[in-house]
Amino acid sequence: MVKVLVAYHSRTGNTAKMAEAVASGVRSAGAEAFLKKVENVTNDDLIASDGIIIGSPTYYGLMSAEVKKVFDGSAEIRGQLENKVGAAFTSSASADGGNQTTLLSVLQAMLIHAMIVVGDPMDSGGHYGAIAVGSPEAECRETCKMLGERVARLAKRLAPG
């Protein structure tokens, strides 16, 4: 079965709510979803996954230090994430808080690993991934679910064997 890691960092609980919706989407597409806080993610988790979806709060228009730590540690496995499907989601306190650039910072790290990245399937304003301003409302949670489904479906197509 295709495995998709949904890893997130959340201080207020908003990004965690988004992660749960993303994981729900992964499962609804018939894949295994592994929901983990980023501080518990290992390089082995990254290697074992067919898809990787990362959630971060928006901090100064960038991913949080906790999320960046995962990518910094992944330098040891460079080349082993090639062709895995990746996506990102973020939450912030305001609409103009740097959401887009936060998503791009996560996707940029994935591209350095030669991953295949996907954006927001609903084009609900995130373009590069799912975005919540404050607590994720029903429409945002649906976007998160669809993002999880999209990654799972594509990972199924690309998974070896």
Image (cartoon, helix red, strand yellow):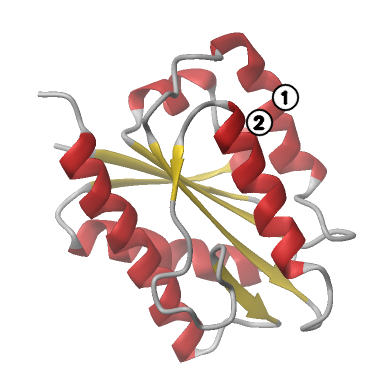
Q: Are marks 2 and 1 in contact (CB under 8 Å)?
A: yes
Query: Disc 2 and disc 1: Cα gap in Å?
Result: 6 Å
Q: What residue type is labelled 1?
A: Asp
Name the residue beneath numbered marker 2: 70
Question: Residue 17, how many percent across, how many down?
Answer: 53, 70
State the residue at coordinates (26%, 42%).
Answer: 155
State the residue at coordinates (44%, 24%).
Answer: 81
Question: Residue 61, how many percent across, how many down?
Answer: 83, 60
Q: Which residue lies furthest to the right in this view?
A: 60
**In the foreground, 138 or 124:** 124
State the residue at coordinates (75%, 59%).
Answer: 101
Question: Residue 112, how many percent across, how many down?
Answer: 61, 28
Name the residue beneath numbered marker 1: 72
Horizontal placement of 46 versus 54: left or right?
A: left
Judged from the image, the secondary structure of the residue bearing numbered disc 2 is helix
Callout 1 crowding tier (Cα within 10 Å): few <14, some 14–19, many ≥20: few
Quarter of the image for the N terminus: give it: top left
